[in-house]
């Protein structure tokens, strides 16, 4: 269960490293840690709000300090409890450590009546990379 002064909800993950739980990413910058998947391959982070929310900003940060690779993410939202989703953005980018290790994206959006938001991370298919996005601590950022 995720809680804040501005929203309440629950979530789901495809995998989670115990020392890097999802709360670490959602509470940034208050914490120094971030979320990391426990297993390689595509990952999904889903937040289900107890009440419909108006979301106007999404801030995402992805980090890769070891492998040069291409990664893709898909951010979607639902206004009907997850029965159907609408795409906010799909983007692909490259990591090239040690020079390009962080990808930050900020989206100004105006989405009312959001019941669910879902982030799918697709690392390069031929590499055993583990997903590790960071989401800013404000509940409007996921």
Image (tube, grey):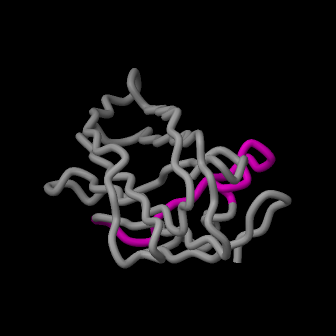
Taking depth in this image into account, of 11 and 64 the one nearest to the observer is 11
Residue under the image location 33 percent in, 43 percent down: 89
For this view, does 41 lie left or right of residue 6? left
In this rendering, the count of numbered labels is: 0
Report the quarter where the N terminus lies.
bottom right
Question: Magenta includes 30?
Answer: yes
Point out the stretch of residues depicted in magenta: 24-41
Residue under the image location 60 percent in, 49 percent down: 55
Residue 44 location (% of width, % of height) = 40, 67
Outermost top residue: 99
Residue 70 location (% of width, % of height) = 23, 40
Residue 97 location (% of width, % of height) = 37, 30
11 versus 52 height, above or below? below
Residue 120 location (% of width, % of height) = 35, 60
Taking depth in this image into account, of 122 and 49 the one nearest to the observer is 49
122 versus 1 height, above or below? above
For this view, does 112 lie left or right of residue 94? right
């Amino acid at each position: 269960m995720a809680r804040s002064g501005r929203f309440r909800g629950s979530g789901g993950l495809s995998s989670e490293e115990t020392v890097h739980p999802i709360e670490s990413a959602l509470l940034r910058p208050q914490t120094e840690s971030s979320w990391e998947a426990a297993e390689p391959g595509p990952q999904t982070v889903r937040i289900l709000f107890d009440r419909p929310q108006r979301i106007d900003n999404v801030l995402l940060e992805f980090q890769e300090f070891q492998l040069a690779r291409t990664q893709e993410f898909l951010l979607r939202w639902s206004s009907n409890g997850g029965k159907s989703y609408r795409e906010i953005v799909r983007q692909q980018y490259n990591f090239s450590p040690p020079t390009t290790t962080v990808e930050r994206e900020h989206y100004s959006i105006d989405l009312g009546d959001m019941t669910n938001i879902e982030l799918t991370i697709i690392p390069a298919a031929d590499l055993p990379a583990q997903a590790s996005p960071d989401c800013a601590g404000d509940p409007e950022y996921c």
